[in-house]
Image (cartoon, rainbow, N blue to C red):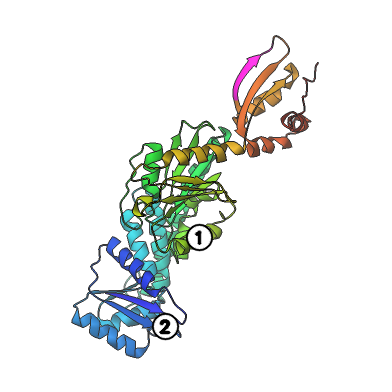
Amino acid sequence: MLVQTTRAGDSDAVARLAEFAELAASAGASVVAQLFARADAPNARFLLGTGKVDELREVKQANNADLILVNDVLSPVQERNLEKYCECRVVGRTGLILDIFALRARSHEGKLQVELAQLKHMATRAVRGWSGLDSQRGGAIGLRGPGETKLELDRRLLRGRIQQLQERLDKVALQREQTRRSRQRNAVPLVSLVGYTNTGKSTLFNRLSGASVYAADQLFATLDPTLRRIEGLASGPFVLADTVGFIRDLPHDLVAAFQSTLTETREADLLLHVVDAADPERDQRMEDVAAVLAEIGAADVPQLLVFNKIDNLDGVLPRRDDVGSQPRVWLSAAQDQGLDLLREALTTLLGRDRLRTELRLAPSQGRLRARLYEAGVIQAERTVDERGWVLALDAPRARLQALFGLADGDGDYLRAALGGIPVPGRDE
């Protein structure tokens, strides 16, 4: 059964309970009863008032429920007291989302991240309260001495496993960073799909990339990040990343555990913010996504708003709106409607900050030529007799401007040449 806490001025409790019911269904639970409970002044012992706790136990017994899900943050003491009083397992919002993530994780990195978040959550629950945790190991041969309580042993084992997982994730993060640097050297922009969970991001990813990432009408259907190189745009190739969907009140342990994955979002050149156009709560969902983006340091990354699922709106046709600071595209990924408009918008946005020009270098500038090749900004080259080279450059402006810091005057040369001022070879 589900418990939805409410507080003074809470106007969306019904919507939050409906979303919580979807989370429960995603975890495989069958909802047999629902209960609203005021929690303006949370009870330190139960979170809920004593009268509401009595009602909770009665409803639980009347419906033979074997699990109580509470859409709120439960302290370890509150969770334990509710379990003892109601005589069944009690799980808060964080525990439920962690359980869903454990079901969805498929990659090695995803499983490591979920386990790390679960153990950090479990560590907060390793408190005194259950019988036997204060028993000491000692007295037997080889174990004499002050001993170690079971609680202390459990905490030590948790700390050891958490450290081990963190070290493994650091290695994975290093591999991701190497891949990211290689992509940057090749001057390939990164476009990351973001949005509230179940807005159709994976379906859109499959349409654009031709991949077959798992997509379903359920919360957190996709957990592990997927990257694909997309060709065919006039602005050049780009890498498209499909990441985990966001949700309101996303547990901080999950945000911390998925930092390496969310780096693809934080360091993207463009975010495709996918919105369910038919969702009556879409404005609130967009605010929730903005809050998570701010939390992970991606609030300033340029965005293209993609209003998906217009097939669920009567009379709305695919269109592209370029008014304002955030351009918008209205489409239906499932019905393959409006994707050409999205590709046009991507071409415009990715090509706007891209520079295609020719640069002439004298024979004495071989070192600068090598640096430009190393940076991956040279698309073609031709030799001009013995007078040097003419290089065709194609790269984001930001990538080229990063080369302005080159020493020995090369940076000044690039700055002048790319600023539209003809600069002949130095030996001419």
Instruction: Point out which mark residue 292 bears.
Output: 1
Instruction: Name the one closer to the observer, 126 or 178.
Output: 178
Compare marks 1 and 2 and give the one earlier in the sequence: 2
Q: Residue 13 appears at what percent x and percent y? A: 39, 74
Which quadrant holds residue 91?
bottom left
Quarter placement of the C terminus: top right
Q: Residues within 10 Å of mark 2 (few under 14, many from 20)?
A: some
For the record, the magenta segment spans 379-384
What amino acid is labelled 1 in the image? Answer: Val
Residue located at (72% from left, 20% from top)? 361
Residue 328 included in the magenta stretch of the image: no
Residue located at (36% from left, 41% from top)? 336
Q: Which residue is mark 2?
A: 39
What amino acid is labelled 2 in the image? Answer: Ala
Q: Residues within 10 Å of mark 1 (few under 14, many from 20)?
A: many
Q: Residue 402 appears at what percent x and percent y? A: 67, 38
Picture layout, residue 168 above or below residue 339? below
Instruction: Point out which mark residue 96 bears.
Output: none
Instruction: Name the one closer to the observer, 151 or 299.
Output: 299
